[in-house]
Amino acid sequence: MLASLSIKNYALIDELKVKFSNGYTIITGETGAGKSILLGGLSLVLGKRADLTVLKTKEEKCIIEAEFHIENYNLKQFFEEEDLDYEGQTFIRREILPSGKSRAFINDTPVTLSVLNDLGVKLIDIHSQNQTLELTEEEFQYSVIDAVASNFENVKQYQEILSTYTKTKSAYNRLLKDQEEASKEYEYNSFLLKELKDLKLETLDKEELESNYDQLSNVEDIREKLTAALQLVNAEEVGVQVAITELKQLFAKLTSFGSTYAGLHDRIQSVLIEVDDINGELIALEEGLETDPVALEKLHEILHKLFAVEKKHGVSGVAELLKIQEELEQKVAITENADEAVLEKQQEMKALEEKLDKIALKIHKQRAKELPKLIKNLESIISELGMPNAKFKIEVAQKEKYLSNGKDELTFLFSANKGGSFGDLKKVASGGELSRIMLAIKSILSEYMNLPTIMFDEIDTGVSGEIAIKMADIMKEMSNHMQVFCITHLPQVAAKGDAHFKVYKENTLLGTSSNLKLLNKHDRITEIAQMLGGEKISESALTHAKELLS
């Protein structure tokens, strides 16, 4: 509920602070006194956009703050999702700066206007002539029916399954598209993949292949060089091995002349051993050399294919080719395994469709069961509101298509006159009729839903007498379930309020300002008497006012 409202430097308001109670609150005042200003200020704190024209004094900022008691509104999840401090006593503040900038706060935490608006609609329903048009919208009509049918949990469950179904269907469609694209390239990709797999890339070492190929291609040149090397080592007169052997023998005779000669002798011995080892390897290499044209041709073929695929794919190495091979395997697998994946998605969708059909049927049955009761209540209430011959035709028919709240097609028709034909609400109902129908619906909803505070802005325009009294009775009854405000010009409606505020203008040397004050019993009698008879209050008007209040 709205517990208090503070407005500073807004339109004709200098500064206003007022506290509200639960129940049925009346707001009255002469035309132009500032009732619309009050609503405008409240709309700002609920997230409406503003500009500098709202500032009364252009050099000062406008501050509007509202206090709400929200313990019964189930809003903890909203506060958690928006990372806000949840308090049963919540304060919303809006500031409009002289620079034109706007700031908004929920429990002193800065928020965007979008967040403020999202919270605002959960706290106050400002019912004006424009808002009555909501009655003609299908989404609102469904919400009314589902409230009466206690269907909200069923609809929520349906929507959760529908969300999963929609995602699954999107994945299925993407899979079909991918399959179509992959099929176009399947043969080419398969050819490329076979070409790479035939090379057995995992077993290839490009450097080793090139080295082996170079050796086999140059056998005669290598043999010639090895033969020459062996001659240098083994020549009888000038060979390296002969020379070092003679050097060793020479120093063997000098070892007795000191450690220096002995050390040189040992080093020459080591060199001789190394030369012997080199000689052995040269002999082995020479003996192992063979001309193998078959092996050479095979290496040439492998390297030729390897260079060709490297050029084709624009890479230069086996590792990169292996990566391309892996990618091709995945692309080919999409096509080869597509039927299995498509079948899996189809089975998922079928299972979800069965769940949707089941819960949609439950939603439909609940709606169809409660519609006669809703129609009866609506016709009964609007009959008392001066429309005794008005009739509704509300029906739901199950269709094949999955909609956002079930599979029902809704027919919501209205006839205002006896024997008249039924038609769409927005086409056949007048503004006054829509206002009364909306009041009837809101009164019914208040019994089924924990509605936010509602503020009726002159919903009684164009009615009088007994109908006005019945309207007041309905709003009074609604206030047993929720906080109700009513801005009215009718004394019959004003007299039913638990609390009565008056909006009035004051003219001072500093200018004109609007104010709001809570009326005591005596003030209420005077106000209602003025509403009955004008500025000059007669005794009969006072008597009538007392009767209405009693």
Image (cartoon, grey):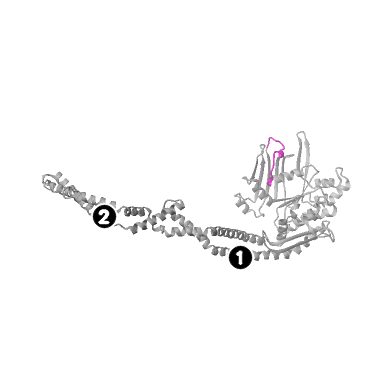
Q: Identify the secondary structure beneath mark 1.
A: helix
Foreground of the two, 376 or 23 = 376
Residue 549, horizontal then vertical, whole percent: 82, 51
State the mark number for residue 233: none
Whether residue 134 is visible, yes or no, is yes
Amino acid type, label 1? Lys
Answer above or below: position of 171 versus 57: below
Residue appearing at x 80%, y 58% in the figure: 382
Magenta residue span = 45-60
> Can the viewer see residue 150?
no
Q: Based on the displayed image, in which of its 4 quarters is residue 411 positioned?
A: bottom right
x then y, percent, for residue 395: 75, 63
Q: Choose between 182 and 54: the one closer to the eye.
A: 182
Horizontal side of residue 24 vs 263, given as left or right: right
The residue that disc 1 covers is 350
Foreground mark, 1 or 2, reads 2
Residue 56 counted in the magenta span: yes
Mark 2 is on which residue type? Leu
Q: Magenta: predominant secondary structure element?
A: loop
Q: Which mark is on residue 285? A: 2
Counting labels gives: 2
